[in-house]
Amino acid sequence: MAEIKTLYATTLSDTSAYGQFVALGHLARRYDGSHWTKTSKKYREQDQKQVYYFSIEFLPGRLLKSNLLNLGLLDTVRAGLKELGLDFETISAAEPDPGLGNGGLGRLAACYMDSMASLGIAGNGNGIRYRYGLFKQVFMDGYQVELPDDWLRNGNVWEIRRENKSCLVRFGGNVWMQPQPDGTLKAMYENTDDVLAVPYDTGLVGYHNDVTNTLRLWSVELPPSADTTYYSQAQRDRIDDITKVLYPDDSNSEGQALRLRQEYFFSSAGVQSIIRHYGLRHQGMKELGKKIAIHINDTHPTLVIPELMRILMDEHHCTWDVAWELTKSVMSYTNHTILQEALETWPIDMFKGLLPRIYQIVAEIDRRYRLAKTPVYGEALVNRTAPLGDGQVRMAYLAVIGSHSVNGVAPLHTELLKDDVLRDLYQVYPERFNNKTNGIATRRWVQLANEPLANLLDAKIGQSWRQQPSQLKTLLAYQDDPKFLAQLTQIKTQNKQALAAYVKKTLDIDLRTDAIFDVQIKRLHAYKRQLLHVLEIIREYLAIKDHPQAQVTPRVHIFGAKAAPSYHYAKSIIKLINALADLINHDPEVGDQLKVAFIPNYGVSLGELIIPAADISEQISTASKEASGTSNMKLMANGALSLATLDGANIDIIQAAGNENEYAFGLTAKAVYGYYERGDYHAVDFYNSNPELKRVLDTLIDGTIPGITTEGREIYDSLLRYNDEFFVLADYESYTQQQQAIGADFNDQTTWQQKALANIAASGVFSADLAVARYSDDIWQVPHAQVN
Ligand code: KOT
């Protein structure tokens, strides 16, 4: 476009890739800036119901390319840059990828924000502007080392600081209720530690619809009183710490006071800003439930419930009953895990000290819950389910009691919530429980990440799938079109070449692009069972060593995974994978038949490179443990076949694409629960009865794999001495059988690509647009653009 040349030509050609990115970012903002203002004005004028999605994590990925795509400018900008002799991809890669999340939960929040904008829903994200995102992972001697992610070092083109929308958040001190002349009670505070919450807003651009919504992230600062009062350095640091760094734990709760401060900080600031905004246009609070929906993404923002109660009662003089009905009608909660260690609870003493007024309100919620429910459900059940119990504040229970809707993220997960984790509360509030299967932003994961595939789809089935991913099903008409299937192979090869070039550059490993690219990308966690994948690699390695001349289908095993810094076992698995990779990749006898590439620092941007190149999607969690999974959906949409347990959304993927197009294996959730109930799982029996498995496991401790003396023993013991908590050995045989079937099937590329096609065609049902439409219809009660 002319504008790039006239306005930006000098800037663009004279600067670094980063400088060019900043210049282009400003250009994009000029375009979407007017949409942003217009969108806010329209929502205001039409008094449209607002959805506020509260999440302690957002993983939006780089925004330049996606904003240009959504604005309809991508092709033009690319062509304009080309005329200037500049490469768009290089410039785009200079953008920092904001790592403000750990994994699935944070990325889901970002996909849903994208869909809300694209469906014209007045959706607002509310979270924390961490000064440092999730650590950068490097490997030293095969061990994970964590470096700080200083993502804001050079500023952030997308954000706008809105100091005029700041608010105070109060911690600690003493609080008491003082009777007023009119008979009401007023909350009085002394000696509180106040901090200032300053919002930074980022525009979220809808797809080809002139809508730009807002992601509001809060940053902490000293309160105005710091201008006149002395704050010691230690006091200043204590305040700064609140938004300094993202907790690097996925599916785990460490229970530290700083985390609780983070949770209240963004919950309180968010609710204050909502009520202030609402108050500008409404008299009284009556309409709140009709005008506002607040969504609680896992339990981290649960304090929005007592915080809204506080504001309604203390600042807007509502009675308890009125405030409570309004609060419940506004709130809804999504649970993302059934792992015990992830369920948040806070010691009452810590909670009370940090949040005295909020504690009073939670205690009153608890008192009234007990009073109302004991006569109906009995004391035992009520004790088990009340917000306060065992000296703890139980966040999930508070979230259920204070919301009108509770959902799981895949059908199996929702059933397990009802039958197991939240079973007692399900007795009390059966009507609140519902399922909302996760979805992904097809725009980012296919249109942006896999342009060759997207273009082929356009050519074959037209462009309607770009607005309505369910149209991908029309692809099934080409299942017997050999030319089309060959094109799929060709695109896959092209994507593998791009990934192979990256792996060569970063790890100096040569990958054959005619090999099976077998991919496992997700956080490193025992329940996700990267270890099972490792056992298969050892099996393949031993098979090659036994029969160096035998014909094997070449394979590349690709891992991407960060371990929480304090998760010792997960870090040992990382060392094991790297040690094994070292052994295999340098063994001349193995050659290019088998390679292992553990790509460091997995995140959204690397996902965009790896996913389009995958043939096999490893989704091998112990059945019942993975709430949904979402990389399974992204890989499927890019034509990878799932090698999957019957867990989370794998079940739904297998059903949608057809069992014959995936590789399912392993214990069912029911079988896993059966072992728990009977207490008769004996890992050692599998070791003793399967000589191949025995041999594979022995390599962990017999020196076959150099450099893992302590890690090998630790892992070996976890399986045999401590009885294999995640049933790795029980699933070994069925898993390795499917792996062998994959090795054989891959040689028939026509049949293989027919399966890939079936996966792409069925992936439309996992679109985040559809998921968000269901949230809108069933939970938030807001209108949205048509999705089907
Ligand atoms: C829970 C507590 C703290 C930090 C993270 C979590 C967490 C993450 N819980 N669930 N997740 C993942 O969420 C994804 C989106 O729903 C799911 O697909 C995935 O199965 C969860 O593990």
Image (spheres, grey):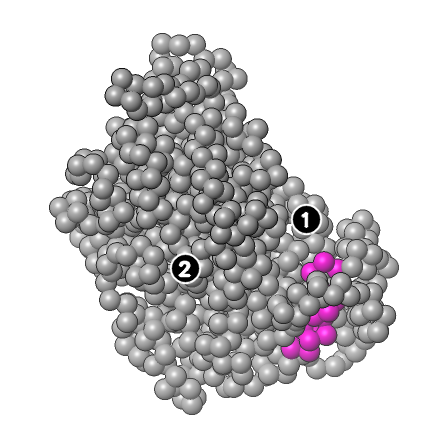
Q: State the image quarter where residue 555 is shown.
A: bottom right
Residue 308 x %, y %: 35, 37
- Residue annotated with mark 1: 571
Quadrant where the C terminus is found in the figure: bottom left
Q: Secondary structure at mark 1?
A: helix
Q: Secondary structure at mark 2?
A: helix
The answer to whether residue 55 is visible is: no
The answer to whether residue 673 is visible is: yes
- Could you tell me which residue is drawn at 28 percent across and 77 percent down? 462
- Could you tell me which residue is drawn at 42 percent across and 90 percent down? 480
Residue situated furthest front in the rendering = 375
Can you say whether 546 is above or below 441 in the image?
A: below
Quadrant where the N terminus is found in the figure: bottom left
- Could you tell me which residue is drawn at 64 percent across and 81 percent down? 741
Can you say whether 471 is above or below 392 in the image?
A: below
> What span is colored magenta in the figure?
724-739
- Residue annotated with mark 2: 431
Type of the residue with mark 1 = Lys
Please tell me whether the stretch drawn in magenta is mainly helix, strand or loop.
helix
Q: Earlier in the sequence, mark 1 or mark 2?
A: 2
